[in-house]
Image: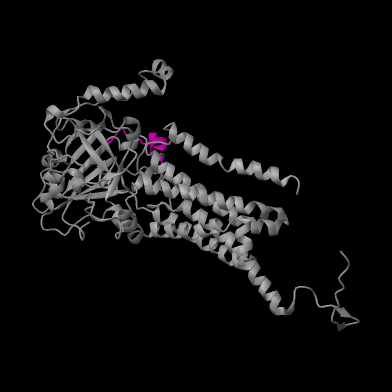
Amino acid sequence: MLIQRPTDIPSSEITPREHYEGRRAFLRNAAGLALATTLPRAFAADRLTGRPGPYSTTETPTPFKNVTSYNNFYEFGTDKADPAANAHRLRTRPWSVVVDGLVQKPRTFAIEDLLRLAPLEERIYRHRCVEGWSMVVPWTGFPLAALLKQVEPLGSARYVEFTTALQRDTMTGVGWGSGLDWPYVEGLRLDEAMNPLALLVFGLYGEVLPNQNGAPVRLIVPWKYGFKSGKSIVRIRLVEQQPQTTWVKANSREYGFYSNVNPEVDHPRWSQAKERRLGELFKRPTQMFNGYGDQVAMLYTGMDLRKYF
Amino acid sequence: MQRTLPYLKAVLFLLCLVPLAHIGWRFYQDDLGANPVEALTRGLGTWGLNFLLITLAITPARRITGWHWLLRLRRMFGLYAFCYITLHLTSYLWLDQDFDWHEVAKDILKHPFITAGMAAYALMVPLAATSTNAMVRRLGGRRWQSLHRSVYAIGILAILHYTWLVKLDVTQPLLYGLVLALLLGLRALWRSAERKKQLAGGYAPQPTYKGKRVIPITVKRGP
C-alpha cells in the first residue's frame, strides 16, 4: 500500500548530507582499505557542495558506486558499464558553453564563470530511464532558469536546444554504425526549461561530476526520461521551432520530443508502468511525471499526452 | 568412443552447470553490477540461447566430422537450454512481474518481444516433455522427429525476442542471428541437395555392365 505524502518536502525532512556521505565513505573503505590509505588524496574527486535546495525527495539515494557505474552515455559505448570504463578520456578543461540564438545578450561562458553564476544547491531527485530503471541522486547545481535569465530570451524564443560535446578523438562510440547522429542534441519547450525543477548540474554526492555522469556540466529534468537530460553540454540555443532531437531523429515512433515519465503510455516495445529502482529486488510502480506532477502537470494542461509522448 | 562416451557426458553435464553456478554465485555476492536482477535475467537468457544453438549445431557438426556419437549428447544440451530458459522466464515472472498474471497477459499481448519469447517457450515445453526414450518410442521416430523440428521455429523466435528488446545496438543479437542462419542454412542446403539427388534418380551411381544399365540384385549375407 502506498502512503500518501506531500510531494513538497520541507527542508527539515531532508536526509542530512553527512549521513549519506557516510554511506559512501563506508563503501569506499570497504572497497579497499589499502588503496584508501596509500592514495587517499590523489584520486579523491574535488568537492563541490551546495546548500540544501527545494524539491528534494526523502527517498534513500542510490549508492554512489551504482550512480557512477551504470550509465547511458552512448558516446562512450552502448553498454551501461562502458562510460565508467571509457569516459576518463573526455577532456573537461578548458570548457565553455555558448548560449545564443533568440536572446538579447548571447554569451559564451567559461565553465569557471558558469559555476559562479548562481548559488549552488543540492537537490535529491528521482531519475527514471526510458529503459525501465531508476535511481535517486543528490545533484549539485542551480536552476537552468538562472542562466536563461542572464541572456534575456527574446519574445520569439519558444524552445531551448541543448547540444552536447563531440570529441571524436576521446569518444569511442561515435564512429560509423553507432546508430545515432552526433553530436547529441536534446531540447525543451522554453516554459519547461524555465520550470524551477530543471537543473543545470555540476556535481553529484557533493563532488564534481564524474565524466561518465556528464562532466563538467549537464542538464537534469527529473520529470522526463533520462535521455532528455543531456550530458557534457557545450551549447544552449534558444529557437522558435521545436528542435530536432537525437532520439526522435533515430526513431520517432518510439521516442517523442516530450518524453515525460508516464506510466500509462508504454514505449512501443516495453511497458512503462513499473520501474526497477537500482538496489531493489522487485519493480515498483512508476509515478506520473516521475512524482513531480505538482510542479509540472500545469505545463501540459489540455495536451493529449498519448499524442505528445 | 562407446566406452568413453558416458564419461564425456558426465563431464559435459557438470560443465553445463558452470554458467548457472557462476551467475548464481555472483548474484549472491552482489557482484552483478548496479542492476543485478537485469544481469541475472539476461545472463540466464543468453545461456539458454547458447545451449539452444549448441543443440542445433549437433547435426551439422556430426555431418561434417562424421562423429555420429555427437548425436548422443544432443538431448542433454536441449534439456539444458530448456532449463536455463525456464529459469530466465521464472526470473521475469517473479522479479519483474511478481506473478501478477494480469500484467503478464497484457505484456504478452502488447509487447512483441514478450510475445516472441513466450511463443518460443510454449514450443519448448512439448519438446522437453517428449525427450525421454519412452516418449520417442511412444510417438514413433517419424512423428517424434517432425514434432522436434519446431526447434527451428524456437531458434527464430528466440532471435526475434532478443533483437526486439534491445534499445539501439543490435550487434549482439545480430551475431546470434548469423550463427542461427548458418546452422539452419546448412540444413536447407543439404536438404535441397538431397532432393535434387532423389529427383535425379537415386543415391548411388546407376550400375552398368558393358555399357548397359542393369538391375542390381542384392544378396543379403548371413548374420
Foreground of the two, B57 or B178:
B57
Query: How many circles with numbers are drawn on the protein?
Result: 0
Where residue B69 sits: x, y (%)?
A: 71, 53
Foreground of the two, B124 or A174:
B124
Instruction: Identify the colour scheme used.
Output: one colour
The magenta segment is A82-95
Foreground of the two, B184 or B23:
B23
- The answer to whether residue A90 is magenta is yes
Q: Is residue B210 visible?
A: yes
Give left or right: position of A74 versus B211.
left
Give left or right: position of A212 versus A160.
right
Residue projecting furthest to the bottom = B212
- The answer to whether residue B14 is magenta is no
Q: Where is the N terminus of chain A found, in terms of image quarters?
A: top left
Residue projecting furthest to the right = B210
Q: Residue at x 58, y 67 (%)?
A: B146
